[in-house]
Amino acid sequence: MRYHVRTPDGELDYLSFREVELAYMQGLVGPDDEVREEGQTLWRKASTIPVLARAKPPARGWKARTQGMTVVGSVLLAFWALMLIASDSWPRRALGIVLALATSALLTRVTYKAFKRPGAPRS
């Protein structure tokens, strides 16, 4: 079933609703754009269609960089932990071990977020 999307810039045609959903997730179709199924007369805003409302467009601005900043922070934290563990003082070594465990938790979070990241095509 074909779908038509009306934007302020013009009208676009998609072969399936999945293509409309992917375009919405990529930001090509906005929440205020209107969608109409072929053969229908009713135009609906994309944000009122439940499947599209659940689909999240990619993050923009500082939210798009949080994963990279977390990785850089964890590398710096790991370096600091290594320096403390290599010191002669036992309290510093203990602090280094705590920082190493914090680094491990941070990298576990990075791995989890990368694994569950949306956008991969579904079959």
Image: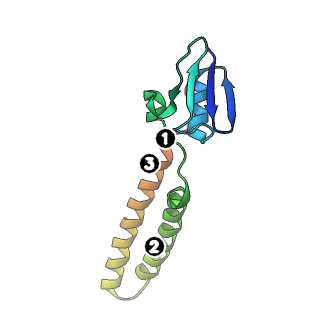
Determine whether the residue tagged by mark 3 lies in a helix, strand or loop: helix
Residue 64 image-quadrant placement: bottom right
Pointer 1 or 3: first along the chain: 1
- Circle nearer the N terminus (3, 2): 2
For image coordinates 38% across by 60% down, the residue present is: 105
Estimate the x, y position of residue 71 in percent, counting from the top left. 51, 63
Q: Residue at x 56, y 39 (%)?
A: 30
Q: Are marks 3 and 2 in contact (CB under 8 Å)?
A: no
Residue closest to the far bottom:
88
Q: Position of residue 45 (x, y in %)?
A: 50, 31
Q: Position of residue 65 (x, y in %)?
A: 54, 60
Q: Is residue 79 above or below residue 65?
A: below
- Quadrant of image for the C terminus: top right
Q: How is the image coloured?
A: rainbow
CA gap between label 3 and label 2 equals 19 Å
Quadrant of the image for the N terminus? top right
Could you tell me the amino acid type at mark 1?
Lys
**Residue at left offset 46%, top offset 49%:** 113
* SS at circle 1: loop
Q: Mark 3 highlights which residue?
A: 112
Q: Quadrant of residue 5?
A: top right
Q: CA distance from mark 2 to mark 1?
A: 32 Å
Specify the label residue 77 is tagged with: 2
- Position of residue 12 relative to residue 56, above or below, is above
Q: Residue furthest top?
A: 39
Q: Which residue position is annotated with label 1?
A: 56
**Tag of residue 45:** none
The amino acid beneath tag 2 is: Leu
Label 3 crowd bin: few (<14), some (14–19), many (20+), radius 10 Å: few
- Most foreground residue, 92 or 3: 3
Query: Which one is earlier in the sequence, the residue at label 2 or at label 1?
Result: 1
